[in-house]
Amino acid sequence: MKLSIDSTVTLNNGVKMPLLGLGLFRTPSGEVARQAVRCAIEYGYRMLDTARVYCNERSVGRGIADSGISRDKIFVTTKLWQTDWDNPRKGLLDSLERLGLDYVDLFLLHWPFKGYEKAYLELEKLQQEGLCRAIGVSNFRIHHLQALEKAGAKTVPQVNQMEIHPVNTEEELCTWCRQRNILMEAYSPLGGEGRLLVGDPRLIGICDYYKVKASQAILRWDIQRGIAVIPKSVRPERILLNSQLYDFDLSPQDLEIISDMNSNERRNYDPDKIDSRPKELCPKLIEEQ
Ligand SMILES: NC(=O)c1ccc[n+]([C@@H]2O[C@H](COP(=O)([O-])OP(=O)(O)OC[C@H]3O[C@@H](n4cnc5c(N)ncnc54)[C@H](OP(=O)(O)O)[C@@H]3O)[C@@H](O)[C@H]2O)c1
């Protein structure tokens, strides 16, 4: 089927999730976040990816309200941070209050912090209550996912959000999740702030051939393989560019050329070491006005 900005993927519980969304990590709260959200919705984005720890949920909620879009037309993801591990229900209710919403579309465990199995069992209850339409995880490796089942989880996570880009393709994890109908969602799809892949010379040939920017080639590479993407930008021209992915089609050979750039170069923390991250490197939770 031809991909368009309205393309969705059906999750393992029947919920439809857009393939393209706006990432909001490091988007400052206040006018910047509010305007980025408004702008993205105006350009046709129908998914927003925030988190408790991004400290911008209130501004994201305001941007959604400004846009005038009806609630059921927008897919909102937020994530539970470690500070709410013992009470995920309170964590979600607080996020909903900040967002100004009655439910989120997707609620994720942000990292496999110690005790994640128990927290996931709570997410299952929140989903049954209707406070989140889909549940999932982020930064989970295969063994973390297997541990959920061993802990008695009845719900296969709908989504696993992971750092995925051309130099960190996570092929084994993607295949494992695909076989179990867990949707993979690529975070830091362009390589992440300060380590962008948009200047990588290995993409020049593809960009010249299709007459696209490297960012477009990378994002198209994801969505053509059924991986959802959430590029972040606060600049209207980039928010627009990152959504212009639908008038070219990468050939199987070109998909492979991009996949072959892989060197398992994960730039974010190692999920297996997240509990030993030094305190001074942990993000601070700031309350927005
Ligand atoms: N679950 C997790 O643990 C986790 C971790 C990291 C990220 N995420 C999610 O994934 C989203 C995306 O990841 P990310 O923000 O780390 O990285 P990213 O989307 O790969 O890259 C964002 C950076 O690229 C710049 N940029 C955006 N579009 C561009 C373009 N077309 N050309 C050149 N530069 C461009 C942005 O700058 P400007 O804003 O100045 O345009 C920003 O510095 C996050 O915002 C967040 O929602 C989740």
Image (spheres, rainbow, N blue to C red):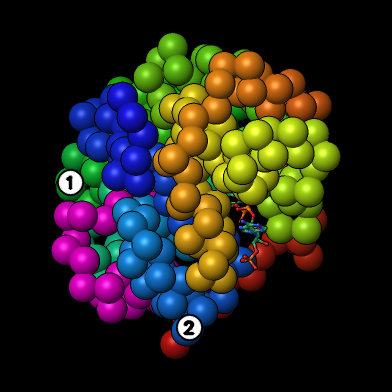
Q: Which of marks 1 and 2 is nearer the N terminus?
A: 2
Segment colored magenta: 55-81
Give the class, few, some or many, for how many residues have Cα within 10 Å of label 1's Cα (few <14, many ≥20): few
Residue 261, image x and y in percent? 76, 27
Question: At numbered mark 1, what does the secondary structure look like: helix, strand or loop?
Answer: helix
192 sits left or right of 72 in the view? right
User: Is 252 displayed left or right of 126 in the figure?
Assistant: right
Name the quadrant containing residue 74: bottom left
User: Tag 2's secondary structure?
Assistant: loop
Q: Name the residue under label 2.
A: 30
Q: Residue at x 67, y 40 (%)?
A: 207
Which quadrant contains ligand 1?
A: bottom right
Q: Above or below — where is 13 with respect to 192?
A: above
Residue 114 x, y percent position in the rendering = 59, 40
- Tag shown at residue 129: 1
Whether residue 154 is in magenta: the answer is no
Residue at 36% x, 56% y: name it.
Answer: 45
In the rendered view of the protein, which quadrant contains the N terminus?
Answer: top left
